[in-house]
Amino acid sequence: MSSVEEFRAPRPEYVPGHGLLKGRTAVITAAAGAGIGGATARRFLEEGARIVIGDAHVRRLNASEEALAEEFGAGNVASLPCDVTEETEVRALFDRAVREHGGLDIVVNNAGLGGTAELVDMTDEQWSKVIDVTLNGTFRCTRAALRTLKAAGRGGVVVNNASVVGWRAQAGQAHYAAAKAGVMALTRCAAVEAAAYGVRVNAVAPSLAMHPHLAKVTSAELLAELTGREAFGRYAEPWEVANAIVFLASGYSSYMTGETVSISSQRA
């Protein structure tokens, strides 16, 4: 082995549930499929939570609900189509959680949209679409979460999905980086406001978590380059990011709010 680039850390063993979220009700956006949202839905169920999942992709959402309900019980899983750019759909998702389970404890804002375009060639439409889903969508869902949790008066947790590109420059990602940096700033400000009624707001910032959708929209060359930046010489599994989200949603992070936790093995 002549260089760090040739190193490949072994894949980790999957961590079993420990009941960290037992009895809690969670809303998770963009939770259909095999990405971070889907992995988070599964991890929450394994930790004893009840979940209401939303996604703009109705077919994948229905398939995810059916599979999870079969494995974890229909009473623990509900879903509702939700486009986070539409306020009425966001509100309906949160109302469903309260109606279905009598309350809400945790919200995971996972919805986001990427893309690659050099700034000199980027259109207003490309910029606005990424910002509307990734930043404005997180705003809409955080606002709905805080309104619901404040009214209930029993505390709660919000976890937002940011990205290391909110800190680190990457060509072709100006719109996505700006949106994710905005998510980090939104997290800090929301945390200061929500602390008064016992709600914690934090974020995770993954570097590279591989899933089928990312593989479809990203070139093999770019994926190889990004993987080469990781100290472990591999990308993260989505469930490794979900583990950090479980930590932030659980009592193990009870004194953390306004923080963005990097989920990365990138070298400085």
Image (cartoon, grey):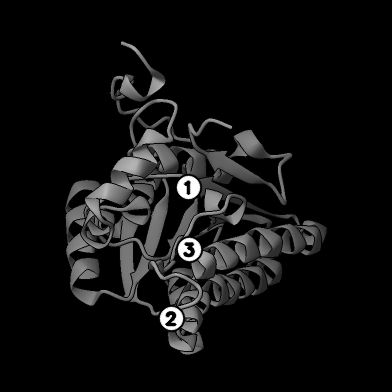
Q: Position of residue 178 (x, y in %)?
A: 59, 66
Judge by depth and name the residue closer to the eye, 216 or 6: 6
State which mark lies toward you, 1 or 2.
2
Which residue is at a point 35% across and 42% down the rendered structure image?
225
Q: Earlier in the sequence, mark 3 or mark 2?
A: 2
Q: Where is residue 140 in the image (x, y as percent from the top left)?
A: 57, 77
- Is residue 66 depicted above or below 48 in this figure? below
Q: Position of residue 47 (x, y in %)?
A: 41, 39
Say left or right for 242 vs 247: left
The residue carrying mark 2 is 126
The residue carrying mark 3 is 173
Which residue is at a point 29% across and 20% down the rendered structure image?
10
- Is residue 35 depicted above or below 233 in this figure? below
**Hey, what amino acid is under mark 2?**
Gln
Which residue is at a point 36% across and 25% down the rendered structure image?
5
Any part of residue 236 in sight: no
Say left or right for 257 vs 25: right
Say left or right for 144 vs 78: right
Report crowding for label 3: few under 14, some 14 to 19, many 20 or more residues within 10 A (C-alpha).
some
- Is residue 175 depicted above or below 14 in this figure? below
Which residue is at a point 71% across and 42% down the rendered structure image?
256
Q: Is mark 2 on a helix, strand or loop?
A: helix
Q: What element carries label 3?
A: loop
Q: Earlier in the sequence, mark 1 or mark 2?
A: 1
Say left or right for 109 vs 55: right
The residue carrying mark 1 is 23
